[in-house]
Amino acid sequence: MNVSAGIVGLPNVGKSTLFNALLKKQAALAANYPFATIEPNVGVVPVPDERLEKLAKITKEEEKMGGLPPIKNALIEFVDIAGLVKGASEGAGLGNKFLSHIREVKIIAHVVRVFEDPDVIKEGAVDPKADYEVIRAELIIADLQTVEKQRESKAVKTDASKKSAVEKLHQGLNKGKSVFEIVLTDEERTSIKDLFLLSDKPEIIVLNVSEEELTQNHAEQITRKYAELLGLPQERFVVISAKIESELAALSDEEAKEYLKDLGLEKSGLERLIQKAYEKLGLISFLTAGAKEVKAWTLQAGSTAVRASGEIHTDFMKKFIKAEVVSFEDYVSSGGRKKARELGKARLEGKEYIVLDGDVIEFKIGS
């Protein structure tokens, strides 16, 4: 499953610094001037999952291997989209081009600058609340333009659900509401999927704070403060320090863990951002384990076993017989699939079984 998140925000809020840290290399031009990033930089990064190493160690013992099998994490694609400015929906800056890049991602990671640095230009930025509202307004205006064009189209006039949805959207957007805030029926929401409206995308607000603020205050305190300021629910926020993430990117895994420990942090901001993106998109990971590889696969929560098999190969859906499922906890406590079978912890499930996060699955496929 392709999972893509677009990193957006005003110029010089720390988007490219964050992106570079995600890739663990200076892949984007993190320059100190607006529009340093013109074409979107795209990077595919692994989703952190500590379960995979445990499965690999068990597989090594169970299969009597000389070394650990290859570990393959689930992946998420991050797109570093150049800084938007006020008037982007009218073509200001390189607005229309940037808005089209946002249209292509599944979730928006909206970076808001909280830190102060006299050496970094604060182009167009005023304060976190105003900065957030500028970007949100540009997405709403762009959507309003799309909806207004649709109102007169033949496709809308001949489709009752779509016509009703478009009229509700027109009214709501004109009041400054984002599409996801406008109440639509399930049928109406389905009818507008082909419009790819920008303010309908799930969003995470990334509070880019200074190193001092993150280490001196708990992330929960910072989140609470800015959630109240912006009038938004706390679960929509992730607190990071792009500076800390940049420093972590240059360290080995062991050094990074030690550095985080010294800072009093359990996880890096990037780990929390990736996990939040999964949560907001309603995604889970199911696992496969064998001598060939140990791998996490991305799946929409609530998906069936046959749908999960299609993530491995589309032919599996046609030839699906059964799925042998062991929960991650049972797999670990049993010491692998063979012992899980002996202990009655392995279940044979059919096509309609709803896959759970952490299920370790072996698919039985016909010829």
Image: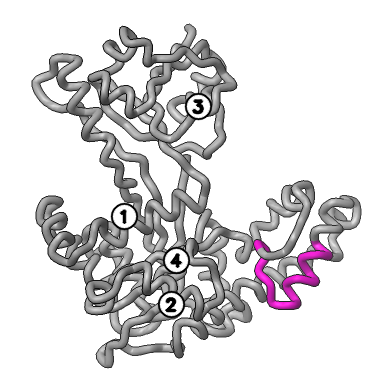
Mark 1 lies on a secondary structure that is helix
Disc 2: which residue: 225
| Local crowd size for mark 2, using a 10 Å CA cut-off: few (<14), some (14–19), many (≥20) | few
Residue 207 belongs to magenta span: no
Inter-mark Cα distance, 4 to 2: 11 Å
Q: Earlier in the sequence, mark 4 or mark 3?
A: 4
The image shows residue 195, relative to residue 366, as above or below, that is below
Q: Position of residue 297 (x, y in %)?
A: 40, 34
Question: What type is the residue that disc 4 sits on?
Answer: Phe
CA gap between label 1 and label 3 equals 27 Å
* Residue linked to disc 1: 271
Range of magenta residues: 166-180
Give the residue pinned by disc 3. Answer: 310
Which residue is found at the position 86% from the left and 57% from the top? 163
Within the image, what quadrant is residue 307 found in? top right
- Nearer mark to the viewer, of 4 and 2: 2
- Residue flagged by tag 3: what amino acid is it? Gly
Nearer the observer: mark 1 or 3; the answer is 1
Q: CA distance from mark 1 to mark 2?
A: 22 Å
